[in-house]
Amino acid sequence: MGSEAPVGVFDSGVGGLSVLAEIRDLLPAESLLYVADSGHVPYGEKSTDYIRQRSRILADFLLGQGAKALVVACNTATAAAVNDLRSLFEVPVIGMEPAVKPAALATRSGVVGVLATTGTLQSAKFAALLDRFAGSVRVVTQPCPGLVECVERGELDGPELEALLRSYTRPLLAEGCDTLILGCTHYPFLRPLLRRLVPENVTLVDTGAAVARQLRQRLREGDLLACGPACPARFWTTGDPVSLNAVLPRLWSGNGVVTQLSL
Ligand code: DGL
């Protein structure tokens, strides 16, 4: 596999674009392929078997496009499928998980809140993450159905979304959380709104930048870092390409070609 081959990135939808931007900023010489499984979003309430099956199909597609490494830019799919993908494929597979470790180090109140999908919060991987990194910090979890659908529509603000976000953050703040983990890749797009809704002293953390650094590390180890110049990013969606084209300018600051994918 050549070092100029692209990096393949996928998510249940457009959320992984928050991770793609971190990768592009850290590794501008890398050519990027992105699949939004928007025809099957949200993953958050679906079964582990279903998400595993979708993840395999998307990974297979990206490898068929020549990807030298895969980034599972989705906490829910990582929890359900990353082990499976690593056992099936030989390329580096980088997954992501809620930022429990940095949040446990950052908190001053000793209480951390996690906003994530039901699938992530109920997974064995998340339980293991808490065992490993929460230490004496109290972790309060909050599933957030409905947020992903808003971001998929490119809706990042507005009274209904604000009411929904308030209903999810209020219980966490009432518990004394001073650090909130954005444990789903769709949520960083809601940062500006969240910032307005929670007190200034509350820290918001996500793992997009850490995943980009992990990718760099894995590519370096495999002597796979590209020299560039990168090709323009390519986007596929299993949903409606017209709607991806419509929301893309709000979620991605660069150009790219969108193609429909029937998988
Ligand atoms: N963006 C995804 C995550 O990081 C999944 C959202 C969903 O499809 O429910 O968990």
Image (tube, grey):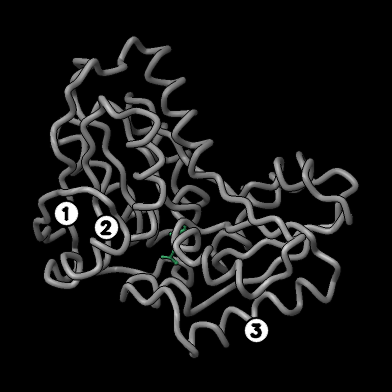
Which image quarter is the N terminus in?
Answer: top left
Q: Where residue 36 is drawn, which disc sits there?
A: 2
Does residue 216 sit above or below 42 in this rendering?
Answer: above
The residue type indicated by label 3 comes to Ser
Cα separation between marks 2 and 3 = 28 Å
Q: Residue 236: which disc?
A: 1
Q: Nearer the viewer, mark 3 or mark 1?
A: 3
Query: Which residue is pictured at 42% across the width and 28% down the height?
Result: 215
* Nearer-N-terminus badge (1/2): 2
Do the residues bearing badges 1 and 2 touch, measured as CB atoms within 8 Å?
Answer: yes
- Badge 1 element: strand
Q: Is residue 7 left or right of residue 116?
A: left
Nearer to us in this view, 84 or 232? 232
Quick one: 82 or 189, which is closer to the camera? 189
Disc with the residue nearer the chain's start (3 vs 1): 3
Secondary structure beneath label 2: strand
